[in-house]
Image (cartoon, helix red, strand yellow):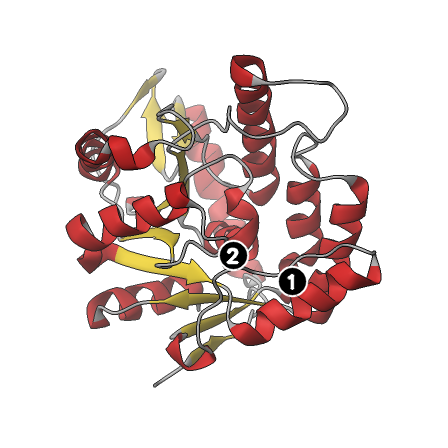
Amino acid sequence: MLVYCLPDESEGTMGEGRYSTLILLTLLLTLAGCQFERGGIQYGGSHSMEPIGEAAVQPSVIALFAHPDDETWISGTLAKFARHGVSVFPVYATSGEAGSDHSGQGLSGAELAGVRELEAMAASHILGLEKPQFLRFPDGELNQYPQEVVERLTSLVELEKPVAVITFTEGGITDNQDHKTLNQIVSAHFNQLAGYFGVSYSRAGSLAMSANKFDLDYEVAMPVEDAAVTIRVDVSEYRSLRVEAMASHRTQFTPTMIQAFSDYADSDSQEEIIIADEQSRTVIIGLLK
């Protein structure tokens, strides 16, 4: 099994002459009534839809989750995508209304779902992602709506034209049925775009040790074999963002759980992706370099 390890690299700096030229160009365009918007140029307040050379082409990735807070499993990689100029669109199939409130507010049902959506929006902002989309299927019942989920995801793929769709590995990491349903849907309908994030046995051991330090009894229910991992992403540069984003989910993670995750982030600076399709593997590796 060929494994790609992707370290973070510091961004290069622009030469003084090129920097001065860019400032002059920006000033001239501003005086002409133009504004920049996401790589394109805005003329007189309306966005130009014409591509402006190669610079206007911005790759995108859809990150498909079952519940708000699921992005915690892959948050460093998502932040790294964003830092490398990739538009990352988080999509939550449910809003987590069947979950429990660990914040002490006594939230449940629709009220809990509304707060969890706000928490996911805050986490996405911290990680530099696009605004999340919430499909609002019933929490815990995704397996009853496979065709509807496929149709919604197909529409998003047609709209955003992502180079990759990232979701859970086969076991869903925690053995959660909604997690596994999303894996099945992506595997069946979007496999050529798919990347599957999971936790190897090695990383699961590290997570369990960090949990034990804080008297938490936690083990990953469905780790994957170390040899099955095709990409190991170095997310050490994003350690603080990972912890801060997790802490946004006050209804889901207690302060002790956040401390344990912080310890884990210190001891294990990798996240893992499994990709079967050779072309998808090449594309995702290219985006993370």
Identity of the amino acid at label 2?
A: Lys
What is the CA distance from the residue labelled 1 to the residue labelled 2?
A: 9 Å
Residue bearing the label numbered 2: 80
Q: Considering the numbered disc 1 on the image, is that residue within a helix, a strand or a loop?
A: helix
Q: Quadrant of the N terminus?
A: bottom left
Q: Residue 115 lies in what quarter of the image?
A: top right
x and y, in percent, of residue 161 in the image:
22, 43
Disc 2 crowd rating (10 Å Cα; few below 14, some 14-19, many 20+) is many
> Can you say whether 97 is above or below 80 in the image?
above
Disc with the residue nearer the chain's start (1 vs 2): 2
Give the residue at x 47% y 36%: 67
Q: Which mark is residue 212?
A: none
Q: Is residue 35 left or right of residue 211?
A: left
Looking at the image, can residue 183 be seen? Answer: yes
Q: In screen coordinates, is 288 left or right of 12? A: left
Is 179 on the left-hand or right-hand side of 246?
left
Q: Residues within 10 Å of mark 1 (few under 14, many from 20)?
A: some
